[in-house]
Amino acid sequence: MIFVVFFYFGPMVFEKLMQFVACREIGEVSYMSVSLLYRCDAGFFISMNLLLIMPLLLAVGVVIPGGIYYSMRKRLKSALSMTIF
């Protein structure tokens, strides 16, 4: 069940997290793509990216798919090693 939920919502979550990292330039000033209230050169933007967004991107992009792959691989090996008499 968790596989279906992750593969259904995973791309959307990854896309939204990437919007927090991306900046857009309006005039001579860079703002966050998600909200024009925060500038990309502000300390809040940098600390938010390093402490919150990057670990979430790592989890959604690497750790969770790796865990799913590992558990599927483990189940496949255990299913193949079963002998039927």
Image: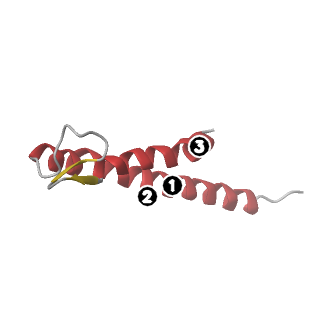
- Residue tagged 2: 62
Residue 43 located left or right of residue 15:
left
Cα distance, mark 2 to mark 1? 6 Å
- Residue tagged 3: 8
Outermost residue on the left side: it is 43
Residue 82 located left or right of residue 49:
right
- Residue tagged 1: 65
Label 1's element? helix
Number of other residues with Cα within 10 Å of mark 1, as a class: few under 14, some 14 to 19, many 20 or more: some
Quadrant of the snapshot with the N terminus: top right
Camera sees residue 56 = no
Image coords of residue 25 (percent x, y): 23, 54
- Amino acid type shown at disc 1: Pro
Image coords of residue 56 (percent x, y): 34, 47
Cα distance, mark 3 to mark 2? 16 Å
Quadrant of the snapshot with the C terminus: bottom right
